[in-house]
Image (cartoon, rainbow, N blue to C red):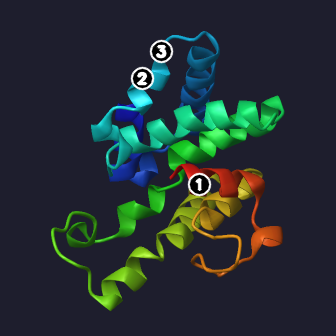
Amino acid sequence: ACAFVDQFMTDPNTLDVNLLAEHAHHIIDRMQQGTGMQRLAMRPKYLVSFSGAHPVNIAIMAVLLSGALRFDEQDRFRAVVASLVHDIGMSRLPPDILHHDRELADVEVAELRQHPNYSAELIQNLLGDSYAWLAKVVNQEHERAQGQGYPNGLSINDIEPIAQMIGLLD
């Protein structure tokens, strides 16, 4: 799954919805079988990363949290799918913003905070209207309950539950 995510994070046009679904189901199945994927999620090098490991890590934790929150099967699947693609918009950012060893300038922070909009736009353009739910979730994953998130400053009642969960896990 990490290589799959790395590929479309490098070139979003390679995102294949069937492979995305296959990887999401595989993660859910492995977690339900108790095959130890939780240990992968807790390895320090995977906790903060712009590699494919980070979205897979979020997906693993989404399986656990969605189970604890008693999400139905469809919402659990959607949470894992959204976890895998939540940062696809990062592919539009300049590398010096993503891989920096300095404090970002205000204009760079503003650009970084546009990545949820880029993610939503990419999902909409690549996957179409049947995935409007996914575009909405990835657009909202950095929104916060009191309206202090970005990119739209939404409050809790306007943020999709799956987006809230991914934002917490991210």
Secondary structure under the numbered disc 1 in the rendered image:
helix
Query: In this orientation, which residue lies closer to the viewer: 41 or 129?
Result: 41
Labels 2 and 3 touching (C-beta < 8 A):
yes
Q: Quadrant of residue 150?
A: bottom right
Q: Residue at x 56, y 24 (%)?
A: 27
Going by the image, does 28 lie left or right of 56?
right
Q: Residue at x 37, y 67 (%)?
A: 92
**Residue 105 coordinates in the image, percent (x, y):** 27, 87
- The answer, for residue 48, to whether it is visible in the render is yes
Q: Quadrant of residue 144?
A: bottom right
- The answer, for residue 7, to whether it is visible in the render is no
**Residue 43 coordinates in the image, percent (x, y):** 33, 32
Distance from disc 1 to disc 2, alpha carbons, whole Å, reads 19 Å
Which residue, given by chain and number where applicable, does mark 1 sit on?
168
Q: Amino acid at mark 3?
A: Gly
Q: Quadrant of residue 141?
A: bottom right
Which residue, given by chain and number where applicable, does mark 2 sit on?
39
Secondary structure under the numbered disc 3 in the rendered image:
loop
**Residue 158 coordinates in the image, percent (x, y):** 80, 71
Q: Tell me which numbered mark, 1 or 3, is placed earlier along the sequence.
A: 3
